[in-house]
Image (spheres, rainbow, N blue to C red):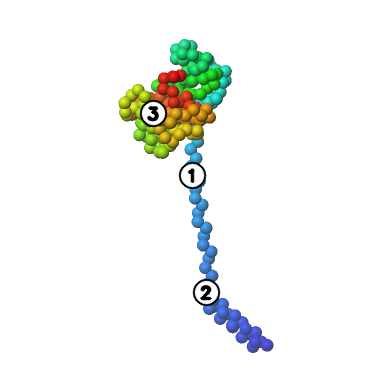
Amino acid sequence: MIRTLMLTSAVLMLAACGAPESEPAPAAPPAAPDAPVTPVDANALTAQGWGPLRIGMTKAEVEAALGADSNPGSVGGAEPEVCDQWRPERAPAGLLVMIQDGVLTRISVAEPSTLKTDRGFGVGDTAVAIKTAYGAGAVSQPHKYSAAPAEDIFVWASGGPATPNAYVQNAAARGVRYEIDGAGKVGIIHVGGPSIQLVEGCA
């Protein structure tokens, strides 16, 4: 019996020596780091509004947020009860609101405004930079009154067309219009609903 146990042990030892060594399990690849998230500036201009102003607010809500017209009658419209444009008393310099039928439909900024859109563009930035940043999302069309390089660049967040010169009438549409001057730079930025397409204030 002892001899049998010794033979069995020898066989097991030889089998163990001849067995291939088991390879260690491959290490899991390191987890990719999360992409940094750039927070949107709370004071950035967006298709939905700026700061305390949201497109769709009533005139009373706009006045509660930033005050009444800082200079009544200075900008306005031919029929202010239908459409009016003015600067609230506590609004940043260069910012105007458009009220149509008692509702905020557009916010516009021009010099000396330093406000920027949620993509980081403000008055004085180039059309080239804007088109590069937005790619196919930027819809360009000729400026109504000025020759090229003046143009209008529309970026519709919702409800807008992907082709130039298609007038948007959907009240729920929201977008940004970069009004480019004769030097190829942003002169005015309009954000809001279909009224961003208006080229002469309320007209």
Please name which of the two marks, 1 or 3, marks the residue nearer to the observer. Answer: 3
Q: Which mark is residue 35?
A: 1
**Residue occupying the point 50% across, 40% down:** 37
What amino acid type should be assigned to the residue bearing mark 1?
A: Ala
The residue identified by callout 3 is: 152
| Disc 3 crowd, CA 10 A, few/some/many (<14, 14-19, 20+) | many
Percent coordinates x, y for residue 198 in the rendering: 44, 23
Q: Is residue 114 visible?
A: no
- Numbered disc 1: secondary structure: loop
The one nearer the camera, 95 or 39, is 95
**Residue occupying the point 54% across, 76% down:** 19
Q: Earlier in the sequence, mark 2 or mark 1?
A: 2
- The picture quadrant where one finds residue 6 is bottom right
- Quadrant where the C terminus is found in the figure: top left
**Residue occupying the point 49% across, 16% down:** 84
- The picture quadrant where one finds residue 153 is top left
Compared with 23, 44 (above or below) is: above
The residue identified by callout 2 is: 20
Quote the CA–CA distance across marks 2 and 1: 43 Å
What amino acid type should be assigned to the residue bearing mark 3?
A: Asp
- Is 44 situated left or right of 149 in this image? right
Quote the CA–CA distance across marks 2 and 3: 73 Å
Q: Earlier in the sequence, mark 2 or mark 3?
A: 2
Compared with 176, 82 (above or below) is: above
